[in-house]
Image (cartoon, rainbow, N blue to C red):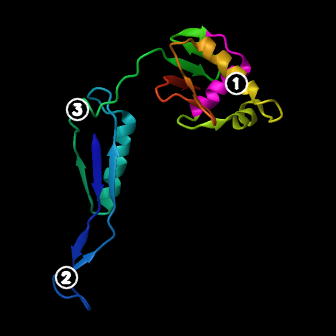
Amino acid sequence: MPVSALSPRADRRSGPGRGPGRRVTEPALTVTLAIPLSGDAISPQAHRLLAAVRELVELSRGTVTVEPVAETPEASEPVPDGPEVRLLTGSRQALLDGAQLPLTRLEFDLLLYLAERPRRVFTRAQLLAAVWGYERAGERTVDVHVRRLRLKLGPNLPLITTVYGVGYRLADDARILIVA
């Protein structure tokens, strides 16, 4: 549901140096918010946000328009197929569709590091420094851990993709949920 907040764009004023009917343009701000809905209900956080926007607009003599968006098949995001991985950071557990994955400390840290930074490619040296905490180990150490992690996740779940000549990244269609 897009919400647009518009400030007044022009004001008619007359006075010294201004002819009658001349428009004086004030700075304008247009804000568009897209609030995702689950069903037809708006969350309490969205209600608070809308109330805050309305209050700000009222203070500046602006307007608020609320327009429901017609749902089109192209506009809705496709629901990814395949299993979901949940990373429980508090207990350091990884769940694959509810079943616990037996990950080592470094495998868990590597998967968590990539999941916290989606769509970003990391070199082996960057991963060694961030996950292992040092850079002196051979870069093949990362390759071995990625290979073992892929084996544990199974062949039907390509979470970590190789960017040839660069390093590794989280797959775009990876279904990973990080739970604190």
Circle 2 — which element?
Answer: loop
Task: Indicate the quadrant containing the C terminus: top left, top right, bottom left or bottom right.
Answer: top right
Location of mark 1 (residue): 143
Task: Please name the amino acid that badge 2 sits on.
Answer: Arg
Circle 3 — which element?
Answer: loop
Residue shown at 75%/36% (left/top)?
129
Query: Dominant secondary structure of the magenta stretch?
Result: helix
Q: Nearer the viewer, mark 2 or mark 3?
A: 3
Residue shown at 32%/65% (left/top)?
28
Residue shown at 52%/28% (left/top)?
171
Location of mark 3 (residue): 72
Of callouts 2 and 3, the N-terminal one: 2
Location of mark 2 (residue): 22
The magenta region covers 101-116
Q: Nearer the viewer, mark 1 or mark 2?
A: 1
Where is residue 132? Give x, y as percent: 76, 30
Q: Is residue 92 visible?
A: no
Where is residue 163? Give x, y as percent: 58, 33
Q: Is residue 117 visible?
A: yes
Residue nearer the viewer, 1 or 13:
1
